[in-house]
Amino acid sequence: MSNASPAPIALFAYDRPDHLVRVSEALARNPEASESPLFVFLDATKSDAAAMRVTAVRALARRIGGCKSKQMIEQSTNRGIAASIIQGVNRLIAEFGRVIVLEDDLLPSPHFLRYMNDALKAYANDDRVISVHAYSYPVAGKLPETFFLRGADCWGWATWKRGWDLFEPDGRKLLSALERQHLTHGFDFESCYPYTQMLRDCIEGKNDSWAVRWYASAFLLGKLTLYPASALVQNIGADGSGTHMGTTKFFENAE
């Protein structure tokens, strides 16, 4: 696919039909959606309790419209969020060389696809930049229209093959390198968030975070991610419906 055309979109869903409806409808309100190929990755149920919701999600996914094309990838066994995203991104990167990634709890603004595609084109050949991110935390004070931070992120993001090729899935290797290079303090945003502990928990099987490994992979190499001054996605999964997040309204700041 030419860089002149919009990048493919990977949308990952599991067992939240109401969230999927909101996210897919919001995505369709992006003017660029009609020229964008959409790939919906649907994980299989891991429990009887989720079976009806998983079935509902698959039925709703068949009715998603608004994009240039749509392909559903339905799993027959439960893979979990980390394997689902890693394998899905691998697939689209291999085919297209770039990808925009959404999950079913990330509500995009009408400007989401324009920002992502513009940034993918602008930084396609800049090896300093590993990815593009659509969410920014609410902060006091005025930020520049866009800015860079060291590392990578996971709430509405995009990358190129050259960026994803740097992803290291082995958490033990990543933690060892962070500790050996005395980088854990910076990795934890100057001790503002326990990312190092999250990585340890991932290694020990206490969480299924691909994202902390993506962040660590980029951070160790000194790579940068582009952020917008104001969030272009809203996380609607902080309502108690998800597997990995509790309930909060802190993240609801998308424009």
Image (tube, rainbow, N blue to C red):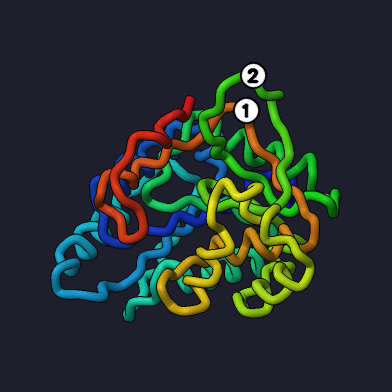
Query: Is residue 108 left or right of 32 when viewed as pictured?
Result: left
Residue found at x 59% / y 51%: 153
Residue 223 in which image quadrant = bottom right
Residue found at x 68% / y 78%: 173
Pointer 1 residue: 229
Crowd band around label 1 with a 10 angstrom C-alpha radius: few (<14), some (14–19), many (20+): some
Q: CA distance from mark 1 to mark 2?
A: 8 Å
Q: Position of residue 117 (x, y in %)?
A: 66, 41
- Res 112 seen here: yes
Residue found at x 47% / y 29%: 254
Pointer 2 residue: 142
Q: Earlier in the sequence, mark 1 or mark 2?
A: 2
Asked if marks 1 and 2 touch (Cβ < 8 Å), the reply is yes
Q: Quadrant of the N terminus?
A: bottom right
Residue ranking furthest to the top: 142
Task: Give the residue type at disc 1.
Answer: Ala
Instruction: Decide which of 152, 19 is in the foreground and name it.
Output: 152
Instruction: Decide which of 183, 234 is in the foreground and name it.
Output: 183
